[in-house]
Image (cartoon, rainbow, N blue to C red):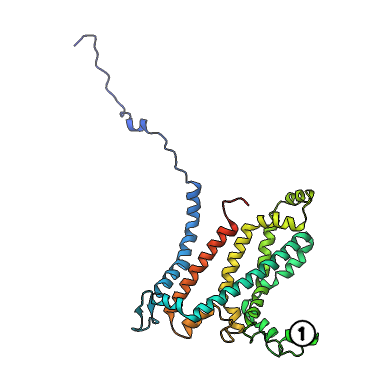
Amino acid sequence: MSPTAQAAPPRTGPAPSRTGAARRPRARRRLSDRGYATLLAAPAAVVLLALVGWPLVRLAVDSLYTGSGLGDGRRFAGLANYVTALTDPAIRAAGGRTLAYTVIVVTAELVLGLAVALLFHRLGPRARLLQTLFLYPLMIAPVVAGLLWRFLMIDNVGIVNELLARVGILDSPGDISWLSDPRLVLWSVALPDIWLTTSFMTLVLYAGLQAIPPDLYEAARLDGAGGLRMLFRITLPLLRPIIAVALIIRGVDAARAFDVILIQTDGGPQSASETLSLTIYKTMVSYNEPGTAAATSTIFMIIMMAVAMVAVLTIWRPGRES
């Protein structure tokens, strides 16, 4: 060893950690907007699956069995209940009446609701009192509305026929049988539904009208467009998504009408006002055929989902320009 070489002084402190020196502050992973929205919607989705998804699964399972499930009467039937539901003349006739009832109610509500919404939009702040009065039917229960209209249109002693007879339109109060004539009863039981929920259609369409920029109407007036031209060129195209949503909601609600018809006619006379909801109810309760009732309900649900999808794609047309 060279005499000039000296031993290194001993280390007195702890050796520096190489891992500590190489460690860098790690960036915290941030949640994306989609992940944050999913996290917020997860509790509602769980509750929805528990309250809606599980009953739908049970409905589909029950449609594959016959019997009430009490004792040994429940037996696996496969698709026999669906065959019965599709071939039963009573169920098919009830489906036709449900379609006719839905078309009558939704068409009348759309026309009346759009007319009243345009009136409110034209009047502006002056229509506040009328808006409040027009929304009153929404506060009435369907059962109460059914009883009210039953007293109004009941044969011989109904208020409607009495008034028509007093003004000379009818010779006697019994000339028109609103609730006992098979040719008129479906139109008659639709009146309470129209009276109850036209306010809802008006409210939805009026909210859509408020979102249309006034500059479009002003530019159309400067170009010489009239009222009808602005209605079909500006108002209705811009209201297409709102109309689609309103039609879907009201179409599904009208198709499953039950309490209003049950209170007025119980599906009579001669089943002329018996819709599919009443048929399912009677099949389940009166005839004690839960399997057929479940199969009919499942088919009804699938048809309504298909109709709603068609309405979205044809009326709303998301992703397309008007």
Task: Say which element carries label 1.
Answer: helix
Q: Position of residue 160 (x, y in %)?
A: 73, 84
Horizontal side of residue 275 vs 170, given as left or right: left
- Of 88 and 178, nearer the camera is 88
Q: Residue furthest top?
A: 3
Q: Residue furthest right?
A: 167
The residue located at (40%, 33%) in the rendering is: 24
Residue 190 vertical placement versus 238 (above, below): below
Residue 233 vertical placement versus 154 (above, below): above
The residue located at (77%, 84%) in the rendering is: 164
Q: Position of residue 175 (x, y in %)?
A: 72, 89
Residue 282 vertical placement versus 231 (above, below): below
Screen quadrant of the N terminus: top left
Q: Position of residue 79 (x, y in %)?
A: 38, 74
Q: Quadrant of residue 134?
A: bottom right
Horizontal side of residue 153 vs 11, given as left or right: right
Which residue is denoted by mark 1 in the rendering? 164
The residue located at (45%, 66%) in the rendering is: 53
Q: Is residue 280 visible?
A: no
- Of 217 and 33, nearer the camera is 217
Q: Amino acid at mark 1?
A: Leu
- Of 18 and 228, nearer the camera is 228
Q: Quadrant of residue 17?
A: top left
- Counting labels gives 1
The residue located at (33%, 29%) in the rendering is: 16
Residue 81 vertical placement versus 127 (above, below): below
Q: Is residue 32 visible?
A: yes
Q: Residues within 10 Å of mark 1 (few under 14, many from 20)?
A: some
Q: Position of residue 211 (x, y in %)?
A: 68, 54
